[in-house]
Image (spheres, rainbow, N blue to C red):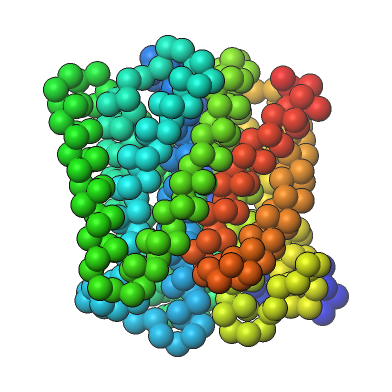
Amino acid sequence: MSARLAPLVGGDIIAYRDAFIAFLVAAAASLVAGLTLATTTGTLEDLPGLLLLVPAALAVKGNIFGALGSRLGTSIHAGVFQVSPRLDTVVGQNAAAALVLSLVTSVEMAMLAKGVAIVFDISPSMTLVDFVAVSVAGGVLASLVVLVITLALASSSVKFGWDLDNVVAPLVTATGDLITLPALVLAASLAGLGSVTVAITAVSVVLSVIGVIWALRAGLRLLHTVMRESVPILTMAVVIDLIAGISIEKRLSDFVEYPVLLILLPGFLSTAGALGGVLSSRLATKVHLGLLHPEAIPRGQAGPDVVMVVSLSIPIFAIAGGMAEVGGLLTGSASPGLAALVAVSVLGGLLACAAVVLVAYYATVVAIRFGLDPDTYGMPMVTSSLDLVGTFALILALVAVGVA
């Protein structure tokens, strides 16, 4: 039986099994995140523009810590991974880079969100200081938790013989969803507090500037490289995620009519991004180990990874739809019905999956061609692109099924 199933899942049943289990855990975590979002419609309406931050805030954690997990996975395969509190180690420099990047991108995301709200006439919206205070407080709180979990996953993968490439993207993305949304909602209480909000914003901006200068001048090669390569791609990723946020903000009435869609949203987007993250991580590791030389057309060692990701997508998106319906029943949220919700999730997921393969593979190709680390470059590009494509795919599926 195993021999017959192997070609259908990319040839490696163990890798498929590990990834599938990770996605099931991620789906459960995303359900909690979705329940949080669905029960905060009042907050979303009281703080116009807050929904703009949701896709970007969720994606930032996946981008930063997914890339961190991907780099640690490569270091494990290369035999140089070792947990140590020292800053000059692989783990120390990666952890420091992740924390500084979290602070910097939170400030940057807030400023860009306010700019986008003005340009696209999302009015009224929160003030700039409100955006920064909410984004930084929620982002930093979530980052500390997700960093600990990412390092624990890396250590556990060494101890238990897991392949980190198969589990880090779904688990870190889902953990980011699980922690970030409650943190963002909690941080929303800091909006409109006058001098307190202004002080938080001022300190956040100053610390982010100091953090970047320190990271670039600390004399730590890996830290410097990660910062230099990450800031531009994370900035681009934030812009992409904010465009996704605009799409959702503009359709807020549909999501308010059927709050179960807000339960589905985090799990749907994180699943699409995590599928791309799994593919990107596996391709990056093979590139580093010399097993794969990216070409214009995916072939060779890339083929089995593509098959595995595609074969994961249908059951995972179906489960995401089913779990969202369960969440709707638990909270009494209005729903278009189980069949319609699963149909929306699977149809939207299939549309997104096509983009998963294209974006993950060609982001790796572009990174290699420009001499960049695909672990650092690929994950943010993949997850953010999939947030945008996934948002459009979900909205198209809602229209096609007749829900919106």
Residue at 54% of width from left, 31% of height from top? 245
Q: Quadrant of the C terminus?
A: top right
Question: 70 above or below 178?
Answer: below
The answer to which image quadrant residue 195 occupies is top left
Residue most extreme to the bottom? 79
Residue 160 image position (x, y, % from top left): 46, 79
The answer to which image quadrant residue 87 occupies is bottom left
Relative to 143, 65 lies left or right: right
Residue most extreme to the right? 4
Question: 272 above or below 97?
Answer: above
Q: Quadrant of the N terminus?
A: bottom right
Residue at 63% of width from left, 69% of height from top? 369
Residue 83 image position (x, y, % from top left): 31, 78
Residue 276 image position (x, y, % from top left): 63, 57
Question: 73 above or below 196?
Answer: below
The answer to which image quadrant residue 45 occupies is top left
Relative to 104, 198 lies left or right: left
Most foreground residue, 217 or 274: 217
Whether residue 31 is visible, yes or no, is: no
Q: How many marks?
A: 0
Residue 255 image position (x, y, % from top left): 59, 22
Whether residue 148 is visible, yes or no, is: yes
Residue at 45% of width from left, 87% of height from top? 79
Most foreground residue, 192 or 172: 192
Residue at 20% of width from left, 47% of height from top? 207
Most foreground residue, 391 or 177: 391
